[in-house]
Image (spheres, helix red, strand yellow):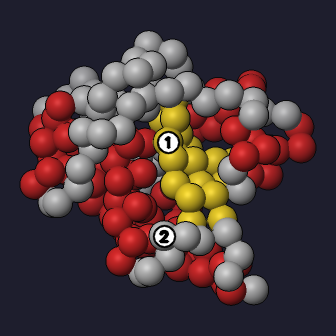
C-alpha cells in the first residue's frame, strides 16, 4: 500500500485545522489506514505557535468523541510543501497565504477542504473564532463531511 500525507491549514491552527486533523485521524483509523495516511495541521500565522486548540473547539470535538487537547499549533513552512502530498486550506484567504510561502512546484498541492464535501455544501469552512459555540459545531459538521470525501478521494492513490 502507498502512503499519502495531508496537512490541514487555517489561520492560527487553533480552531478549524486541528478540528479537521482530529476528524481525519479518526476516519483514517476507522478505515484501518493509519499506516498509509499521515495527517497534520498548521496555521498561516504565528500567533498561537505551541498552544493547544481553542477550548471551544476542544469542547465541541469532545462531545463527538474527538480529542484535540494533545494537538499544538504550528506555522506552515516552505518545507511542508515537500513533506505533504496535499495542503488542504479552510478558506480562500488561507490559499492566498499559502501561495506566498509555497515554492512554485508545490502550488498544485493546495486545495480547499470543502472541495471534497458533498455538492451543495459551502465553499469554505467559516472561521468560528469570533462567534459563539454553534460555529464550532458547524466546523465539525463541515469537517466530518469533507474529510469523508477526502478519504474517499485518496483511496485510489493508496492502493494504486
Residue lying farthest to the top in this orientation: 47
Residue nearest the observer in this picture, 69 or 19: 69
Image quadrant occupied by the C terminus: bottom right
- Residue 142 visible in this rendered orientation of the protein: no
Residue placed under numbered mark 1 in the picture:
41
- Residue 43 visible in this rendered orientation of the protein: yes
Question: Mark 1: few, some, or many residues within 10 Å (few <14, many ≥20)?
Answer: many
Could you tell me residue 38's position as x and y percent? 56, 58
Task: Report the residue at 25% width, 24% height from top.
Answer: 130
The numbered mark at residue 158 is none
| 102 displayed left or right of 75 | right
Residue lying farthest to the front in this orientation: 35
For the residue labelled by badge 1, is the local secondary structure a helix, a strand or a loop? strand
Residue placed under numbered mark 2 in the picture:
34
Could you tell me residue 34's position as x and y percent? 48, 70
For the residue labelled by badge 2, is the local secondary structure a helix, a strand or a loop? loop
Residue nearest the observer in this picture, 30 or 35: 35
Mark 2 / mark 1, whichever is N-terminal = 2
Task: Report the residue at 57% width, 48% height from top.
Answer: 7
Residue nearest the observer in this picture, 60 or 68: 68
Q: Quadrant of residue 16?
A: top left
Task: Report the residue at 34% width, 66% height from top.
Answer: 26
Q: CA distance from mark 2 to mark 1?
A: 16 Å
Could you tell me residue 44's position as x and y percent? 56, 26
Task: Report the residue at 51% width, 47% height from top.
Answer: 40
Taking 68 as reference, is 153 above or below it? below
Mark in the foreground, 2 or 1? 2
Could you tell me residue 96's position as x and y percent? 66, 31
Q: How many marks?
A: 2
| 146 displayed left or right of 78 | left
Question: Mark 2: few, some, or many residues within 10 Å (few <14, many ≥20)?
Answer: some
Amino acid at each position: 500500500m502507498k502512503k499519502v500525507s495531508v496537512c490541514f491549514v487555517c489561520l492560527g491552527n487553533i480552531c478549524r485545522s486541528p478540528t479537521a486533523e482530529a476528524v481525519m485521524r479518526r476516519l483514517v483509523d476507522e478505515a484501518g489506514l493509519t499506516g498509509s495516511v499521515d495527517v497534520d495541521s498548521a496555521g498561516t500565522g504565528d500567533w498561537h505557535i505551541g498552544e493547544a486548540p481553542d477550548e471551544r473547539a476542544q469542547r465541541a470535538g469532545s462531545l463527538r468523541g474527538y480529542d484535540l487537547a494533545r494537538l499544538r499549533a504550528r506555522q506552515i513552512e516552505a518545507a511542508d510543501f515537500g513533506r505533504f502530498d496535499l495542503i488542504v486550506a479552510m478558506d480562500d484567504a488561507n490559499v492566498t497565504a499559502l501561495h506566498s510561502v509555497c515554492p512554485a512546484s508545490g502550488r498544485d498541492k493546495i486545495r480547499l477542504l470543502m472541495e471534497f464535501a458533498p455538492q451543495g455544501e459551502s465553499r469554505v469552512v467559516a472561521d468560528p473564532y469570533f462567534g459563539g459555540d454553534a460555529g464550532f459545531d458547524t466546523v465539525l459538521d463541515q469537517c466530518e463531511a469533507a474529510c469523508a470525501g477526502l478519504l474517499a478521494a485518496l483511496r485510489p492513490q493508496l492502493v494504486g
